[in-house]
Amino acid sequence: MGADVLLVERRRRIGRPAQCAGLVPAVAGRSIKGIKPDAVLSVVRTARSCFPDACEDTSGSPGLVLDRERFDNALAGEAAAAGARVLSGCRVEPRRSGAAAVTENGGRVNVKARVVIGADGPRSAAGMLIGSINSDFLKTIQVTLEHGHEGDETLFFFDRELEGGYGWLFPAGSLRRLGVGLPARSGIKLRQALEYFREKMSRRGFVSGRVKKITGGLVPAGGPLRCHEGGVILAGDAAGLANPVTGAGVMNALISGELAGEAAARAAGGEGDAALRDYADEIEAIFGRTLRQAVTARKRFMESWNLGDDELSAILRRAWPLSAEYRHAGRQEEEISRS
Ligand SMILES: Cc1cc2nc3c(=O)[nH]c(=O)nc-3n(C[C@H](O)[C@H](O)[C@H](O)COP(=O)(O)OP(=O)(O)OC[C@H]3O[C@@H](n4cnc5c(N)ncnc54)[C@H](O)[C@@H]3O)c2cc1C
């Protein structure tokens, strides 16, 4: 759109180390230009969700498991090909004036910018600058294993021992990704939870082999934040757009990132603050209600962990977007709003 763009990434190599399981809905492959075939490790068709009452729910849930390193790198490559200047290995210190100070090999460069887009993750410096800060998180840990459950299925396990969270197992090419996510305030140690879950999956014959990689990180779980002030807008995890129940945030980061880029270009191209206000309104319209509902649903199941298996599982099924009950409730709501 003719804007002069500087893209700055703290890490030396964009996307590395990847802190993600990489699952995105299949529709992302059609709508996002950056998903090249070599960034897709597995194509999945169904999702199996297992609840504490031992009932399982299998739903059609087409998805792609991405190699985030390749994917993030390809996106940065596209930005560069479209004319953006890409600086990696530099930390941004956003400024209220719209100027960002960048440290490069210990040096400091002051950059004037009409708009700063904070797409800098769950502990966003841009968010801190405008007082819009994620305060509730899921803490996660994930290992990549050599062997495991074959097939085109993702597995999700709600388990009494993983209080307030869940475990996952995804195919990733010839490897398997196994991880757990728990409320950040949980007293349960992540490594212990991971070992417990890995043991359980191993007993069921779902995983085996050596650990090839270990990763983890925080996912915002408090819902959407105010994402605009002055010349600063926030996107993705920085704006609190990950789903608090599932912890999925890639798709929402991509959608909001694209909208943020367009709004910034419009603002710089003469529309000024109005374009940034439009962005904030659009984000609220697209994500606000669904994510706030997910915050409430998560709170409810976290408070219900001491109930019996049947009651807890019923509450979890109502909160879990991949369950038949959740989908059914969504369809009913659509019908009511249409009638
Ligand atoms: C273990 C794990 C598994 C996950 N699995 C999934 C999944 O399967 N599917 C899914 O949809 N979501 C998943 N998520 C969530 C998903 O990874 C995030 O929601 C998503 O990456 C958000 O994208 P983002 O661009 O907003 O933030 P990020 O991906 O965090 O990117 C922010 C970037 O900003 C850089 N940065 C930060 N501060 C600065 C600074 N001051 N200066 C310069 N650069 C800076 C960081 O280095 C980083 O590269 C998972 C998260 C974790 C931790």
Image: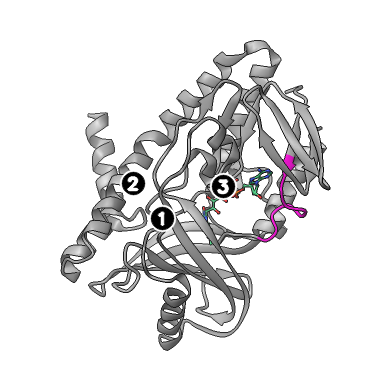
Q: Residue at x 67, y 37 (%)?
A: 93
Q: Residue at x 39, y 45 (%)?
A: 222
Residue receiving disc 1: 246
Q: Residue at x 56, y 73 (%)?
A: 143
- Tally the numbered discs: 3
- Residue 136 has which mark? none
Residue receiving disc 2: 294
Q: Is residue 261 visible?
A: no
Residue 54 relative to residue 75: left or right = left
Select label 3 or label 1 by which is in front. 1
Q: Residue at x 73, y 40 (%)?
A: 8
- Which element carries disc 3, helix, strand or loop? helix
- Which element carries disc 1, helix, strand or loop? loop
Quadrant including the C terminus:
top left
Location of residue 328 in the rendering, given as x and y in whole percent from the top left corner: 26, 50
Q: CA distance from mark 1 to mark 2?
A: 9 Å
